[in-house]
Image (tube, coloured by chain):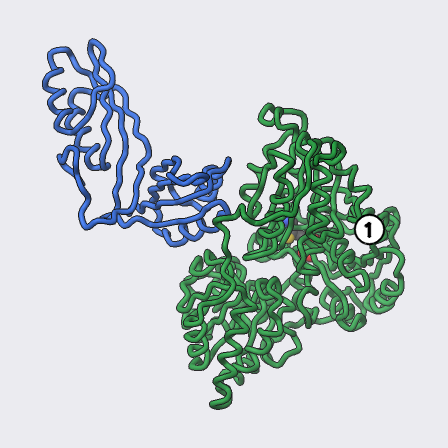
Amino acid sequence: MTHHTLSVIVEDKPGVLARVSAMCSNRGFNIHSLAVGPTHMAGRSHITMVVDAPEVEQLKKQLHKLVNVIKVQELDTGRALETEVMMVRVSCEPAQRGELGGTADLFGARMVDLTSNTIAFEISGTPGHLGDFLDQVRPYGIVDLVKSGRIAMKQRSEKPLTLTPTASRT
Amino acid sequence: MRNNHFTGSHSLLRSLEHEGVEVVFGVPGGAILPAYDPLLDSPIRHVLARHEQGAGHMAEGYAMATGRVGVVFATSGPGATNLITPLQNAKMDSTPLVAITGQVGTSAIGSDAFQEAHTTGLAMHCTKHSYLVTSADEIPDIIHEAFHLASTGRPGPVLVDFPKDVLNAVTEWRTPTLSGLPGYKPTREGHPRQVKAAVEMIEASSRPVLYVGGGVIRAGATPELVALAEAANVPVVTTLMGRGAFPDSHRLALGMPGMHGVYAATTAMQKADLLIAIGVRFDDRVTGDVASFAPGAKVIHVDVDPAEIGKVRRADIPIVGDARSVLAAMVERVTERRVEGPAPERADWFAQLRDWQETHPLSYTQDPDGPIKAQYFIERLHAITGGDAVVTSGVGQHQMWASHFWQFEKPLSWINSGGLGTMGFAVPAAVGAKIARPDEVVFAIDGDGCFQMTAQELITATTENIPIKVAVLNNGAYGMVQQWQKLFYDGRISASDLGTTVPDYPKLAEAMGCVGLRVTHPDEVDIAIEKALSIEDRSVVIEVVIDPEEMVFPMVPAGGSNDHIAMGPEDL
Ligand SMILES: Cc1ncc(C[n+]2csc(CCOP(=O)(O)OP(=O)(O)O)c2C)c(N)n1
Ligand SMILES: [Mg+2]
């Protein structure tokens, strides 16, 4: 099913996220990923929602209907800046550290924890970039994995800049 | 300067007075007790209901009879949970309501304290918006916002939950502002280009139908609707919630469409080339099977709630706006067109509609020796009152018959539970309507099953001196349930018989301080109605023992196509 990414500005008030998710569950909109955080504007939070909704127009209208929702924007997949943070711990014997470290460097992943037989990395980027990194480290054995929800904002330039690793941007 | 005697409770009442509230309906309890004390000194009248559900429906009845915001008070926990049904009812029928609930003290919230319920959480699904007040200083703004939200845009219920310590906190009152609603900007005016396109589409249509609902009543748009129908020469169907939005006696009126709709109204929509939908939401009780609904019709959809447009049926011309201002804009354009020439005659279409009306009327047969048919009783009630009454109803067969056989001429005269279908609505809604319109006769046309759900509110009517009339159409059954069992479950009657002997309705009425009457023969009907109308100082309950075999027709079975309307059981 097609994913839609919505950028939603809401009032930063208790219960707003609950209202958004209650509405989605009531009306059967399936939330694939959801991330909330503050914005540069006082009293405003930003929600990035990725949904599997064939009826995305209806979802946008229902979001708008929530009194605490200020703005709803659908981000066009080709024209959105999207990123996600992932932490992943993989099995790694001391002898494998060099090789795995090299792979991590290529992807711009940062080591955040090390034990005698595991390494934990933190990596951010597009969902495709994270997926490619996972494909590379999967053979070592994934021990633990956490992802933030996806956050997104509108792309205003013709082409997104890529300052950090360029490997397999999607 | 802060006055130590002026607390959150005072601020709440001051705010309600500021909103022009004249009456609140409620039941007190521990958490909301602080608010009940200054109520004694306020000009606001409190009507003590016998159950919070009753209080909620009274507030709805009040709102539906006036177009103003109804207000209900309840305590925390069970008081608040008892309000869930009226809140959802008001949400479904877009009724402006403000619910004030008590809550346990702020520090006890979340601790499973005595009579604690997560009221704002519960309300999330059954209100337009809700608030938990965290500081007494917020009260003026929050109450002002609550009334604004309840009564503007698409009206609906708003709940404000007050922790007990907030009601007790010392505070001061100041004139409220609406600065706290950055995301709430309902559109009132329809887009002029859309309005123009709509009028052109109407003028070009050969088989148009105005499909009109509760939104027209909430917007007070009846004069504009009548003007548009006349100037554009378009017939009108009125949904269950829209009854009274357009006068039934008008030559362009076709009556109610849908599952139990008038044949001509339902069929007109099926065969239309254009539906002009105003303040309606293409409810499944109107459309039947959506895929086969009005297959040849283009759609102009006017609604103040953008989310209704395109939700069920794609609109060729969507117009977001208040029904009254959009209709007024349409009338203006159509009137310009009339300068150029007369309205399209649509002779074939009107001839066809007349034919459907004549060949498929609403009908029933009253045997002069009885039993009484519900339809006959309602027709007599209409004739004897001259239609000069506010009618409320419960949910079931009697509701459909009331909608069929009462002629609605004015908006705000039909108060029923359409969207939620809440049994027990009629009696408390009648109490609320009577408070709002004390000089008018308010008649609840109720079923025996519905009556048994909230009849105790007649005690409220008596003790508060709010005299209403109730007709209990007693078929000894959950008649509508039984109708389905007879038609679709091989006549196997499961849990829908109520018996006709218990309770003894006149005695029950008398026990609650009302006059109780019973009619069993058609000859007694007029006498009982006249007697009921002559009693003004007390409520009157007429038990009408009706034919339990009678069924509601026309009927389109649930999910069926509106192309196949059964005029009687033989057609199913
Ligand atoms: C609160 C509630 N419970 C159950 C129902 C399901 N229901 C719909 S109509 C009906 C029967 C109503 O009986 P009565 O008031 O006697 O009306 P009648 O159909 O006999 O005229 C029932 C049980 C409902 N609508 N509301
Ligand atoms: Mg009954």
Colour blue maps to chain: A
> Taking B24 as reference, is B220 left or right?
left
Q: Dot 1: what SS?
A: helix
- Between residue B49 and residue A13, name the one nearer to us: A13
> Taking B418 as reference, is B66 left or right?
right
> Looking at the rendering, which quadrant does residue B225 occupy?
bottom right
> Looking at the rendering, which quadrant does residue B260 occupy?
bottom right
Tell me the quadrant of the picture where the N terminus of chain B can be found: top right
Res B311 visible: yes
Determine the residue positioned at 60% across, 76% down: B226
- Between residue A48 and residue B556, name the one nearer to us: A48
Which residue in the structure is indicated by mark 1? B461
Colour green maps to chain: B
- Between residue B315 and residue B540, name the one nearer to us: B315
Amino acid, disc 1:
Ala
- Local packing at callout 1 (Cα closer than 10 Å; few below 14, some 14-19, many 20+) is many
- Residue at the limit of the structure toward the top, as seen here: A116
Q: How far from the left and from the top, in percent, is residue A111?
A: 21, 20
Report the chain holding disc 1: B
